Image (cartoon, coloured by chain):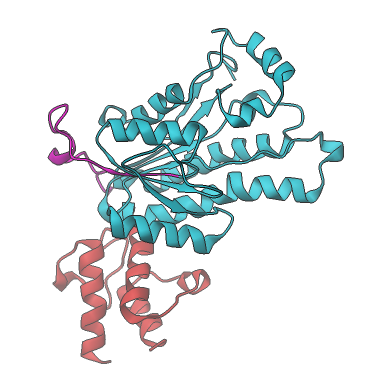
Chain colours: A cyan, B red
Amino acid sequence: MTARMPDSPDDSTTAAAGTRAPRVVLVTGGSRGIGLGCARRFLDLGDKVAVTYRTKPPDDLAGALAVPCDVTDPATVESAFAEVEKELGTVEVLVANAGVTKDTLLLRMNEQAWHEVLDTDLTGVYRTVRRAVGPMVRAHRGRIVLVSSVVAFLGSPGQVNYGAAKAGLVGLARSLAREVGSRGITVNVVAPGIVDTDMITALGEQRVEQLRSMVPLGRMSTPDEVAGAVAFLASDDAAYVTGAVLPVDGGLAMGM
Amino acid sequence: MSDATFDKFRSCAVEVLQVPEDKVVLEARFGDDLDADSLDLVELVMALEEAFDITVEESELEGIETVGQAYELISAKL
């Protein structure tokens, strides 16, 4: 059996800077935090952007399509994709960002707290990516970026569930990268550190200060700084990057 | 076998595997003759499921190596 040559980028994707055709970008969990930052970034880049939200739609995201979706419910994942495909077209860039935390020390962590976080943060990504990848395979193009966390590598007391799920995303991404590489589809991971979002402030001031003191760059990141890394992985410049984990953590977990 | 059914099967294979129609014969092997990788076959199964409105379980695909074997599997479900 002869080896099939992997797809190389076609001319339509390598147009001169600034004249690139808009892509259809879907960001899960796009109503706040990192997801909202990513959505804004892609809008600035001129892409057609859709975000999913679970509790309430973003109130400050003009120009994007907001669709309800709970990634723990396969039916809503399907309906969200169907709406995006109908309104904007086939999803070419997927940013799997939706995630939750339910922190407590392992000795107090019941099965429900474990399953709830795994169901959203890991299985939810499986559901989302699984729905997205079919059309990408058929189109012979696509970019998938999974939003993991520094916790996957550094660990964090009280986040056994979250750390396991976020580490699981790396294995998911790398296996999938091997499955779909021959179709020109890349699958990468960003691993943010301490980002100025609701999820971080929920940790309490003392814990945030403690974490900040461990960051070589000495500060939290903005959601937009994470969005920059996500946008890079979705860009033509990253065409040859797949299965990579890009830390965006101010050096917090460097070397891990 | 019904010619219309095989025609439909063959057009799925031609479209998904990007091979000339005359290569899609019963004795053709997906890997050696049609240059199909595992992802191609998954795509083909999905296209066949849609075209014929059937469901194929993963376990049924084990050991399927030729066009003829795949066609037999599909036509048995119609």
The answer to whether any part of residue A39 appears in the image is: yes
Q: Main secondary structure of the magenta part?
A: loop
Whole-percent x, y for residue A19 in the image: 14, 32
Residue farthest toward the front in the current orientation of the protein: A59
Q: Out of A170 and A73, give the one closest to the viewer.
A: A73
Q: Is residue A77 left or right of residue B5?
A: right
Q: Is residue A120 left or right of residue B40?
A: right
Per the rendered image, the range of residues in magenta is: A1-27
Whole-percent x, y for residue A31 in the image: 48, 40
Q: Vertically, is A195 above or below A130?
A: above
Magenta span has A100? no
Q: Quadrant of the C terminus of chain A?
A: top right
Q: How many marks?
A: 0
Whole-percent x, y for residue B31 in the image: 32, 61
The answer to whether any part of residue A241 appears in the image is: no
Picture quadrant of residue A94? top left
Residue farthest toward the bottom in the current orientation of the protein: B2
Rendered residue at 41%/71% (across/down): B64
Q: Quadrant of the N terminus of chain A?
A: bottom left
Whole-percent x, y for residue B45 in the image: 37, 69
Q: Vertically, is A198 above or below A57?
A: above
Q: Vertically, is A154 above or below A172?
A: above
Q: Out of A75 and B10, give the one closest to the viewer.
A: A75
Rendered residue at 27%/27% (across/down): A237
